[in-house]
Every structure is written in structure tokens, then in C-alpha cells.
Amino acid sequence: MGKRSQLILALALFSLFFGAGNLILPPQLGYRAGDSWWLVVLGFCLSAVLIPMLGILAHARLQGGMFAFAKKVSSRFSLGYCFLVYGISIALPAPRTASVTHEMAIGPYLGSSPLWTSLFYFGLVFVFVLNRSRISSLIGKWLTPIILLVLLALIGNIVFDFTGGLERGVLEAPFSEGILEGYQTFDAIGAVVVGGVILISLNLEAPELDAKQRFRQISGAGWLAGAGLLILYTGLVLSGALIHSDLNGTESRTEILRMLSELALGGNGNLFLSILISLACFTTAVGIVTGTADFVSSRFGNSGLAYKLTALIASLLGVIMGQLPVDYIILVALPALMFIYPLTIVLILLNVLPNSWTPAPVFRAVVFTTLLFSVPDFLATIGFDSLRESLGDSIPLMQYQLSWVLPAMLVFAVFHLVFAKTSQVKP
């Protein structure tokens, strides 16, 4: 496989990461950041570009599926992690695609109820998942470059036509706010899920490749896809910061994106972009439900009944959650993300490191430390902030909801030194 094949693989990866959150989050973040937009970009791209691409790199090293990510802790822990990730995926990011579709392309033009949009949307998702149609993947392959070009035109029009100055932002800690908002893209979780899909596809399309060649192909494609996301996020954040004076501060995330589109592309351009985004969201929802149904089915001997029941339950859950406003789904998602995202980041980083650095005891210690120190941030998001208040400033970065970072790093350093020294003195 040559450079052209790697570019096609990168495009496929980009389309798998490209979803509702990738578009609606950066413009509002830029609007709130104002002249500190570049700090927001650094934080946002750390959690929404660098970590996901390291996740793809980890898949390339492991040469396995999502179950392999947490297997060093224990098989039971890994199985529980997989079920938790898939459960969150069908409960939050999949329904959010329907909500974005309604707010971007259906509600403003037809004025219909979000319930009808959600019913029709996930009815189609269920049909596509049952038939395992190739239409969604074909749409994704064609739509991704088109949407990318349209968005680059949008960003170019906003950036190059702007003549005013940037206004002062309202974010007290733009860098950490960018990191936390990057959680909402679900891209780190997406990397853990879709990396295995990419690996299986590569094995089927190019069985002649050995492990080293597969590693080079996947890692190279991952960094190309990451570069595309980096350009897109930077442009959308900057665009949101530049139109600060055109907003009154009460607009939702989707409204800000629609306003950007109207300013840059006009009414017809906005409608065109809305339709493209809706179709891209649809392929994302089909992929999430199909992947979840495949995983559950595999735990029951590849049962067709388990596959159909999982697809039905996921679609019904999508109908219920998909009729809620996008901003509300994002708010509901926060507690789940504050719990699962630190764990996912740590699993990605541990699997990127050489095996000699991460024997099972080191792996377990870092994972459980991360879970323990994520508890105060998780409890605060569901209204129980007393633990974090009682701890005060005793844990570094707690005020930025990143209290797990330094303890995890410290435990890794200590355990790595201990076990590295132990392994050196063994005969």
C-alpha cells in the first residue's frame, strides 16, 4: 500500500471522527474565549486531536480491538469498560446527531416537532443497521471531503473578510476550558472504538501487510486525519471569536454555527451545509449503533437475535434522547464524560508507551489512581460538590476539574521506577 492508500485510510478515519460535536462546539468556545482563542485551541486540540490520534497509534501497536486496551488491568475490568463505553455511546453521542439534525436542518425550515425528527431519524438508523447497508459508508466517503471544502470556504470567508479587533473573552481559564470542552467531542472514546474497525478493514483489504507495515499505515493515516481536524478546529474557534460583536450571548451552539454559515455562505449555502451535516451525522449514528450491536452480539456467540435486540434498544434510546435540545444533551453528558474520559485518556497513554514501561502492576496502579481522583470532579457535576470543597486546594489542578492528572503521573513515575529496578536485579 502506497501514499494514496494511506491518504484514503486517513480520509476514512477523518469521516469516522467527524460528527456533531466536532462542528457545534468550537464556534461557541471561540465566541466565549475572544482574544484568548489560541489558548482554547491548544486545550481543545489536546483532548480532541492529540489524545484521539494517540488512541489510533495505540491501536496500531496493540493490533487488537477495544477489549485489548484495559486487558492488563483484568479481563473483567476490560469487559466492564467496553460495555460502559458502548452504553454511553448509544445514550449520548448517537442521539445528539439526531438533535443536531433537527436544530440545523429540520426545525428552522419545517418547524416540526423534534419528536417526529427523532422517530423518523432513528427509524432509518434501525433499518440501515439491520440491513448493514453500504449506503451510509458510501455517503460518508463522498460527504466528508465535500463538507471539509465547504467548511474551509466558510472559515476563509469569515477570517479574511474580518476587519475589526478581537474582544475580551469571558473564560477565566481558557486552556482548561478548552480541554474539558474537547471531552464533548467524544473523540478519545471514538479512537478506542473505531481504531479496531480500521485495523480489521486494513487486514481485509491488505492481508499481505505484516505488523510493522500495518503500524506505519495506521499511524501515518492517524496523523493525517489529526492534521485535518486541527485545521478545522482552529478555524472554527477563530471564526467564533471574530463574530463576537454579532452575537448577544444567548445563542445556542447550533445557532452560532448557523449564523457563521449565513454570514459566510448566505441563506442557500447555510441550507446546503445543514443538509450535508445532517447526512454526516446520520452515518455517525449508524456506525455507533452497528458497532454496539456487533459487540453485544459477539458476547453471545455472534447471535443474530442479540444483534437485532441491541439495535432496537439503541434506536429506541435514540428516539427518547434525540428529541432533547443539543445543549441539554451536552449538559447531561458531562457527568459521564468526567468519569469515563480521564480513564480513557490514561488507557490510551499507557498503551502508547513501550510494554517494558507498563507491566500489569504499573498499569493497574495508574488506572485505579485515575479513577479515584476523578471522583471529586464527577460528584461535582451531579451536584455533590462537598467533597471537592472539603479538599480545597490540597490536590493540584482540582479547580480546573483535572485533579486526576498529577496523581496519575506521580503514581506512574514511582511504580515505573520500582518495577524497572526490580526487573533489572532479576537474574
Image: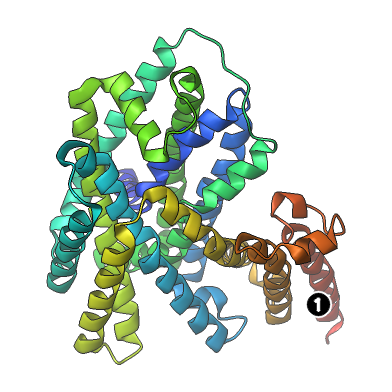
In the rendered view, does 131 fall on the left or right side of 169?
A: left
User: What x and y, as percent, mark residue 142?
Assistant: 19, 44
Hey, which quadrant is residue 159 in on the image? Answer: top left
Q: Amino acid at mark 1?
A: Phe
User: What x and y, as percent, mark residue 395?
Assistant: 83, 59
Hey, which quadrant is residue 206 in on the image? Answer: bottom left
Q: Residue furthest bottom?
A: 301
In the rendered view, does 91 fall on the left or right side of 272?
A: right
Residue 137 in the image: above or below residue 26: below
Q: Residues within 10 Å of mark 1 (few under 14, many from 20)?
A: some
User: What x and y, as percent, mark residue 176?
Assistant: 66, 44
- Inspect this view and state whether residue 353 appears: no
What residue lies at 19% left-to-right and 54% top-to-bottom? 117
User: What x and y, as percent, mark residue 185?
Assistant: 46, 51
In the rendered view, does 208 fall on the left or right side of 354?
A: left
What residue lies at 44% left-to-right and 31% top-to-bottom? 236
Residue 64 in the image: above or below residue 400: below
Residue corresponding to mark 1: 419
Q: Of residues 384 and 30, which is closer to you in this image?
A: 384
Color style of the picture: rainbow
State the quadrant of the C terminus. Answer: bottom right
